[in-house]
Structure formats: C-alpha cells, structure tokens
Amino acid sequence: MDEKIMQAALAQEESCSKSENIKWGIRQSFRQGKVNFNYTKFLGYTKDAEGNIVIVLEEAEVVRKIFDIYLAGNGVRKSKIIWNSTELRL
C-alpha cells in the first residue's frame, strides 16, 4: 500500500477513535447529571456557585421577545426591524 494512503487511513482511524472517546465522555457526564454548558455565550442563563443553571431574568425577557418574533413567522430581516423598534436592549 502506498505510504500516503496508509498515513491517511491511520489518521482517519485516530480521528474516529478520538470522536468515540469524546462522545463516550459526554454520555458519561449526562448519566451522572452533569451537563457541559457554555454560560458565557448563552443568553438568558448563567450558573451559580454550585454550577447549577440559573435564569437571568433581565436576559430572559429579551429571549422571550426574540422567540415571540420568531414564532410570529418573521425572518431575520423582519425580526431585526421589529427588534430595533422595541425598547428592549441586550
């Protein structure tokens, strides 16, 4: 077998192995009740000192408004126009 083909096959196998290991770790965390959650980039939620998910009420109001605009069937452009006409700000 050509050396480059062999290297590519080994790299692919290593990638698959890493992926399976990561998925296994995530599943184990879920089974233990632990969830990885990027609180710094997720509007409306944060975590407390114990690591529990906590709703940020001021941000939750913004999330509800955005969701209502979406549920009304508005696309991105129309949503932006509607959003800019509201008093709410991030």
Image (cartoon, rainbow, N blue to C red):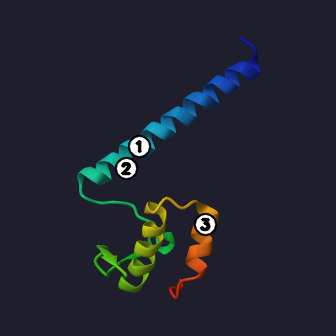
- Residue at the left extreme, as displayed: 32
Q: Earlier in the sequence, mark 3 or mark 2?
A: 2
Mark 1 residue element: helix
69 up-or-down from 54: above or below:
above
Label 2 is placed on what type of residue? Ile
Q: Residue 44, how many percent across, how many down?
A: 41, 75
Q: Nearer the viewer, mark 3 or mark 1?
A: 3
Q: CB atoms at circles 2 and 1 under 8 Å apart?
A: yes
Mark 2 residue element: helix
Q: CB atoms at circles 3 and 2 under 8 Å apart?
A: no
- Residue 78, label in figure: 3
Label 2: which residue?
Answer: 26
> In the picture, residue 78 is in which quadrant?
bottom right
Decide which of 7, 30 is in the foreground and name it: 30
Mark 3 residue element: helix
In space, the residues marked 2 and 1 are separated at their CA atoms by: 5 Å
Q: Residue 13, how many percent across, how many down?
A: 56, 28
Label 1 is placed on what type of residue? Lys
Q: Residues within 10 Å of mark 1 (few under 14, many from 20)?
A: few
Label 1: which residue?
Answer: 23
Q: Residue 8, how many percent across, how many down?
A: 68, 26
At horizontal 45% and vertical 78% (from top left) the residue drawn is 62
Locate the N terminus and report the quarter of the image it occupies. top right
- Residue 50, label in figure: none
> In the picture, residue 32 is in which quadrant?
bottom left
- Residue at the top extreme, as displayed: 1
Q: Earlier in the sequence, mark 3 or mark 1?
A: 1
Question: As drawn, is 47 to the left or to the right of 3?
Answer: left
